Image (cartoon, rainbow, N blue to C red):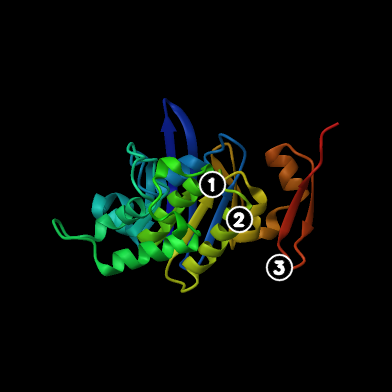
Amino acid sequence: MLQLKDVALSHREKEVLKSTSLSVHGGEIFGIIGPAGCGKSSLLKILSGKVRNFKGETLVDNRPIRSYSRRERAKKICSIPMLPENMDISVFEFILLTRTPFKKALNPFSDFDVQITEESMAGFELSPYRNTLLGELSRSHLKAALLAFCFARNADVLVLDDATDGLDLRGLVLLQKMLFRYVVDGNRTAVLAGNDINFIAQTADKIAIMHEGTIKALGGPEIIEPEIIKQYFGAEAFVSKNVYNGKPNVHFFPEG
């Protein structure tokens, strides 16, 4: 379980995240949407433990995130990594590195580490690129490798900021499938934020809409309505329902 209790964050004397509280349970995919500068990325950095100078408290399994050692936190939470400085590393070697927090010093990676790496690559259809260098990948395949790195960690909490950015259509389909599979046993949680409203609406179990550093609306995908889009995104839209799952599809009107 993941909890935020009255979390706030300031940067250069500007309050970028106001007092925010929420709970995310095991088995849930939690989506966060909102306009640029609303605080999405700041919130995810706090959730992933990358930012520690915030007010309030973030709890993972009822334990303050700031009490975890770096290694403990790496086992519990995984977020999309930065691109490595050395791009002359194969896809397999790169993704395998995500298992480092579980590896004993001076010992090789285990058979399980190799297995879960292979499974994560297969999930994003990267197996044919197993020995390809990161620097030789297309943009979509490179983003898929970064995501596969996250999923292969097998952490309790997956934190994905702009997960869909750079993915082609097939990549989006695979990401959604991997997210559903990741939380299906009810023991793990995924939190994703981004600008692809339709992907989040079709994928998340719960959605928070952020604006000006705080959560303005919280609920199931059904909270995404034309009035909400107009109020917080400043865009005219028509919202229909997906005939397969009943979740909302947002259609934007061109401005005349």
- The residue to which callout 1 is attached is 140
Q: Are marks 2 and 1 in contact (CB under 8 Å)?
A: yes
| The quadrant where residue 129 appears | bottom left
Label whose residue precedes the other's in the sequence (2 or 1)? 1
Between 45 and 150, the one lying in front of the other is 150
Q: Nearer the viewer, mark 2 or mark 3?
A: 2
The reply to whether residue 183 is in sight is yes
Rendered position, 109 above or below 94: below
Label whose residue precedes the other's in the sequence (1 or 3)? 1
- The residue furthest bottom is 185
Residue at (15, 60) in percent of width and height:
107
Residue at (48, 50) in percent of width and height:
160
Q: Nearer the viewer, mark 1 or mark 3?
A: 1
Label whose residue precedes the other's in the sequence (2 or 3)? 2
- The residue to which callout 2 is attached is 170
Residue 162: x %, y % from top left: 53, 45
| The quadrant where residue 81 appears | top left
- The residue furthest left is 106
Between 213 and 112, the one lying in front of the other is 112
User: Is 124 placed left or right of 114 in the picture?
Assistant: right
Disc 2 from disc 1: Cα separation: 9 Å
Quadrant location, the N terminus: bottom left
Between 185 and 218, the one lying in front of the other is 185
User: Is 136 placed left or right of 99 in the picture?
Assistant: right
